[in-house]
């Protein structure tokens, strides 16, 4: 019975770990940019000038539009964008592919909107019109809300997406400041560094592996301490040698804004804490738009999975520890012990 319960807990841990890794991978895929949010729409000339100075920017904003599918008409919530649609939507499409950045005649609709306009979710290739412009449905994504994603060059844009690069991952704040200066855009009201929740979610997904590594390291340390001189030193040398080989790779992937050389500076710790607190505040207080709801829902789901993983890991550790203690006190273990010398 004990083994059956332990096996069931291990299977549950494996299932939740697989689900957590899948959710973290999807979250990382939808968090590929720094999102700049403005309380008031950007001026049309500012948008045009920024797009010329810094190609690759994605502008978007939310609104409403009267859509005509031919036989049916409806008023729908609409995301107007200019640039890369994948940075705005933040979710996979059930059918088709999102319009490419140069495509000004393609659009994407939710399955709920497809049912309202066309009477079916199979809407890829069909056409709709909005404000006298005709668009071809390139993709259909899952959503309970009637939502359309339409390209536009002169909409009231309230958000700008800056696609991440390797430099951005090293120091997101400084990289964003440089892009703002280069593009001439005004200082945003909120900055959303979406890579931060994605990185936390990824770390939480790997928690069982880290937990097992810590338990094995503690066990190896206890086992090595019981060894005699040559074996004990050989084990410790192997461990420290492996750590020294892994250290350069760790430092290469370590973000520069968390460089260890500044850890002794108390003023730097205070400044870093204030910056992280501001990012967290922006993440919570920025008006929800576009992909925000899906990102926050995925992050909360990751936290819930992590709590369950912690409980299962600790329960398994306790069961293995209790089983080892029970075996050490069993009569068979006592009888197998060598008899003391007379």
Image (spheres, grey):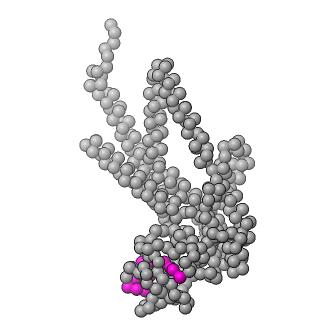
Q: Residue 194 lies in what quarter of the image?
A: bottom right
Asked if residue 110 is among those painted magenta in the image, a careful observer would answer yes
Residue lying at 54% horizontally and 54% vertically, measured from the top left: 200
Residue 182 lies in the magenta stretch: no
Q: Residue furthest front?
A: 102
Q: Residue at x 45, y 38 (%)?
A: 215
Q: Position of residue 66 (x, y in %)?
A: 52, 88
Asked if residue 19 is positioned above or below residue 54 in the image, the reply reads above
For residue 71, what is the image quadrant?
Answer: bottom left
x then y, percent, for residue 281: 62, 62
Which residue is at a point 41% across and 52% down the rendered structure image?
17
**Quarter where residue 155 is shown:** bottom right
Left or right: 91 in relation to 53: left
Q: Quadrant of the N terminus?
A: top left
Please state the extent of the stretch shown in magenta in the rendering.
105-119
Residue shown at the point (37%, 43%) measured from the top left:
316
Q: How many marks?
A: 0
Percent across and percent down for residue 128 are 48, 87
Question: Height in image: 342 above or below 6?
Answer: above
Asked whether residue 22 is in view, the answer is yes
Query: Horizontal placement of 309 versus 251: left or right?
Result: left
Image location (x, y in percent) of residue 248: 60, 41
Against 32, is 234 above or below? above
Residue at the farthest top position? 342
Does 245 sit above or below residue 126? above
In the rendered view of the protein, which quadrant contains the C terminus? top left
Viewer-side residue, 163 vs 274? 163
Would you say 58 lies left or right of 205 here?
A: right
- Can see residue 75? no
């Amino acid at each position: 019975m004990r083994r059956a319960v332990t096996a069931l807990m291990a299977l549950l841990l494996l299932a939740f770990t697989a689900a957590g890794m899948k959710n973290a991978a999807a979250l990382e895929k939808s968090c590929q940019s720094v999102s700049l949010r403005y309380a008031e729409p950007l001026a049309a000339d500012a948008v045009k000038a920024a797009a010329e100075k810094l190609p690759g920017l994605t502008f978007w904003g939310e609104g409403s539009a009267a859509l005509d599918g031919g036989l049916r008409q409806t008023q729908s919530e609409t995301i107007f964008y200019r640039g890369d649609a994948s940075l705005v939507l933040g979710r996979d499409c059930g059918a088709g592919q999102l319009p490419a950045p140069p495509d000004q005649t393609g659009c994407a609709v939710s399955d709920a909107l497809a049912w309202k306009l066309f009477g079916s979710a199979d809407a890829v290739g069909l056409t709709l019109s909005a404000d006298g412009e005709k668009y071809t449905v390139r993709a259909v994504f899952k959503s309970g809300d009637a939502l359309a994603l339409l390209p536009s060059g002169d909409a009231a844009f309230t958000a700008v997406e800056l696609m991440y690069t390797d430099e951005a991952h090293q120091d997101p704040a400084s990289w964003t400041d440089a892009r703002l200066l280069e593009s001439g855009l005004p200082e945003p009201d909120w900055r959303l560094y979406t890579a931060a929740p994605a990185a936390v979610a990824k770390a939480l997904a790997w928690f069982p592996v880290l937990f097992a590594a810590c338990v094995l390291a503690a066990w190896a340390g206890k086992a090595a301490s019981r060894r005699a001189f040559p074996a004990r030193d050989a084990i410790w040398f192997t461990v420290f040698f492996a750590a020294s080989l892994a250290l350069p790779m760790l430092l290469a992937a370590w973000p520069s804004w968390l460089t260890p050389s500044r850890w002794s500076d108390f003023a730097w710790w205070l400044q870093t804490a204030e910056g992280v607190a501001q990012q967290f505040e922006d993440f919570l207080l920025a008006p929800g738009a576009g992909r925000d709801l899906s990102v926050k829902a995925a992050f909360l789901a990751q936290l819930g999975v992590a709590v369950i993983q912690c409980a299962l890991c600790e329960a398994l550790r306790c069961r293995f520890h209790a089983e080892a203690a029970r075996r050490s006190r069993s009569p068979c273990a006592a009888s197998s012990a060598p008899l003391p010398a007379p």
